[in-house]
Amino acid sequence: MAECGASGSGSSGDSLDKSITLPPDEIFRNLENAKRFAIDIGGSLTKLAYYSTVQHKVARVRSFESSGRDTEQDHEPPYEISVQEEVTARLHFVKFENTYIEACLDFIKDHLVNTETKVIQATGGGAYKFKDLIEEKLRLKVDKEDVMTCLIKGCNFVLRNIPHEAFAYQKDSDPEFRFQTNHPDIFPYLLVNIGSGVSIVKVETEDRFEWVGGSSIGGGTFWGLGALLTKTKFDLLEMDRLERPLANLPLLLDPSSYVPDTVDLTDDALARKYWLTCFEEALDGVVKRAVASQPGSVDAAERAEKFRQKYWRKLQTLRHQPFAYGTLTVRSLLDTREHCLNEFNFPDPYSKVKQKENGVALKCFPRVIRCLDALGWEERQLALVKGLLAGNVFDWGAKAVSE
């Protein structure tokens, strides 16, 4: 998270400040709008979480019918699309070595201008060691929390609310990772926490757990010994989770067991290669659509290029490490692309295309309704089903259908 540079001459405080570079856009995003802080200081790393407000673009649709405009002319679209700024909440995570904690606190103090909070929640052994420093630098009261309680509560929340967070790993299996597709009762379980040391905790219920073992061997040493013994690399086990809002499917009998993806791309190397290539080849078109969707924006091309680079890197990662972000499906590839587009303020690159297609479709709508009304009941149901399937097929494989 921090970039090391050469130390300059001068006092020790100056050299500490100059020993790292902290670009605000890359490290402490939206810090000026931070509202609440929490910090975990371990034996070697400091982890900081803060909640802040952030502006991002959203697509708004307004019908001309309500505005009194005449849309009977062929060149008139059926509705108006506008991109507006909206303020939402975002949770940020930052980590850095404890060596740099003083410089980081100075940086936060200098850029923290809109916070109303007077307290920072802190946990970990360093919460005691650096308590006075934090209160002096940030002018915030340190409220120390029990590290084990925080750890268990966080783990329970993740296991219950994040899809496919739990998985089984077998080195010689194909695929090596097997992810849970539903959310069974998570208790009991053993939590092995690897940090500057290693601790093993038995968790039986939400509030019943106990420490059952561990080691003073450093986490890095533990990973190193494990890598030597198993001839593997620890970074293959890191899981970078996507942010996905959870929503139940009310029309299903058992929403918890429903899995909409029928093909797991981690099971089929040929299918995985095909779909990754499809998304990569479509990238130029998505970038062009994104720029075209915001004709009045002076920085649209620059943001679109940043989107291209980020999404392309994720696709390359998935070619070499299919499990890098958890389960891999066509839907997850689409979700990732949408997430990256939203990150660079492109809420809907296809809004103009949809507007044009919807305009054409609405002009055909009265004729289609008259044709359906003229059919018998059974023929009408069949025609409706065919129409729904045709629309979905076109949406699933528009390129193939066009060809």
Image (tube, grey):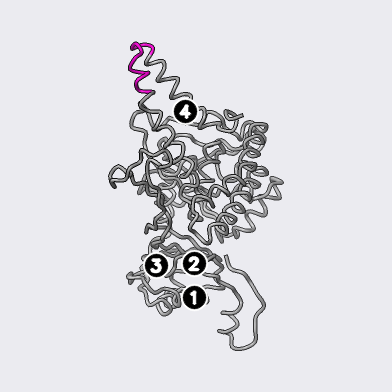
Residue reaching furthest front?
73
* Residue linked to disc 1: 107
First-in-chain label (4 vs 2)? 2
CA gap, disc 4 and disc 2: 44 Å
Can residue 121 be seen by looking at this rendering? no
First-in-chain label (2 vs 3)? 2
Helix, strand or loop: magenta stretch: helix
Amino acid type of the residue tagged 1 in the rendering: Phe
* Residue linked to disc 2: 28
Occupied quadrant, residue 268: top right
CA gap, disc 2 and disc 3: 11 Å
Residue for point 32% across, 70% down: 116
Q: Which residues are magenta?
A: 368-379
Position of 269 relative to 342 (above/below): above
Kindly identify which numbered label has been placed on residue 172. Answer: none
Q: Is residue 101 magenta?
A: no
CA gap, disc 4 and disc 3: 44 Å
- Left or right: residue 403 compared with residue 124: right
Mark 3 nearby-residue class (10 Å; few <14, some 14–19, many ≥20):
some
Mark 2 nearby-residue class (10 Å; few <14, some 14–19, many ≥20):
many
Mark 1 nearby-residue class (10 Å; few <14, some 14–19, many ≥20):
some
First-in-chain label (4 vs 3)? 3
Kindly identify which numbered label has been placed on residue 33. Answer: 3
